[in-house]
Image: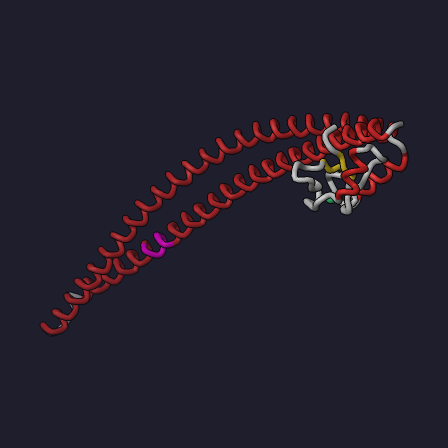
Amino acid sequence: MDFTEALKKLVELQTTDSGLDDLDRVRKGFQKEAAAIEASLAALQARIQDEKKALDELLKARKTCEMEVGALDSKIQKYQGQESEVKSNEQFAALKQEIEKSKEEKSKSEEKVLEILFKEDTQRAELQRLAGELAGAEKQAAQAREGLRQKTADCEKAALEKKAERVKQLAELPPDFAQGYEALRGNGKKIALAQIREDLTCSGCHMSVPPQTLNEIRKNIGIQRCNCGRYLYEKV
Ligand SMILES: [Zn+2]
């Protein structure tokens, strides 16, 4: 196999591998999308739990106020029962004052109860709205999950095809190139093959290609490697 042919095959292998890398990126993108969907559902569910807690707090607060109203009611009745028993005008006036004070407190507590009832209504409406939102989001999520599952399966199928192609392409290469290429990929160099750019630098590491190397490439003397290890080529 001459060098031009080997280089051409290396470029083809690199194209397949870049395709595989792209598919992997796309698949990871789908995974992220799926995770984002679950996270937003979980956030909505957590929000509903918080709002339910807030409603429980309102119910508790109302219960406390209603108990206050009841207690003040008993107090007022007790004082009213004492009205006929007092001996002096002063005592009577003091009792009247106590009754008035308790009535005021009672009416304040009753107002609070009403206020809380109003807030409960608002809170229940909000919970209902959120339940509707969650139902909608769950329906959308189910569709999105299915779409992503399908797209992921397509990606995996395409990747399998590319992997089979890569095995074939690798087998067609002279073994030393195949090993060199695999070693570069194994070292994390996704682009094992670097085109020489117009400014005569390696497109992999951006260093200038030495004139000597450039000369050898142009004269087609073997396949040259950059100092970064990548196989260098000019336009194929
Ligand atoms: Zn380089």
Which one is in front, 79 or 66? 66
Question: Which quadrant: the N terminus?
Answer: top right
Which one is in front, 80 or 140? 140
Secondary structure predominantly adopted by residues drawn in magenta: helix
Residue visible at 55% across and 42% down in the picture: 39
Residue visible at 60% across and 39% down in the picture: 35
Q: Quadrant of ligand 1?
A: top right
Residue segment shown in magenta: 61-65
Q: Position of residue 56 (x, y in %)?
A: 42, 49
Q: Could you say which quadrant of the image residue 156 lies in?
A: top right
Q: Could you say which quadrant of the image residue 66 lies in?
A: bottom left
Location of residue 43 with respect to 6 vertically, above or below: below
The reply to whether residue 174 is in sight is yes
Residue 169 as seen in the image, left or right of residue 108: right
Q: Could you say which quadrant of the image residue 209 lies in?
A: top right
Is residue 64 one of those drawn in magenta?
yes
Question: Which quadrant: the C terminus?
Answer: top right
- How has the structure been colored for display? secondary structure
Q: Position of residue 212 (x, y in %)?
A: 79, 42
Q: Position of residue 228 (x, y in %)?
A: 76, 46
Is residue 14 one of those drawn in magenta?
no
Which one is in front, 159 or 129? 159
Residue visible at 73% across and 33% down in the picture: 234
The reply to whether residue 185 is in sight is no
Q: Position of residue 82 (x, y in %)?
A: 19, 66
Residue visible at 81% across and 37% down in the picture: 216
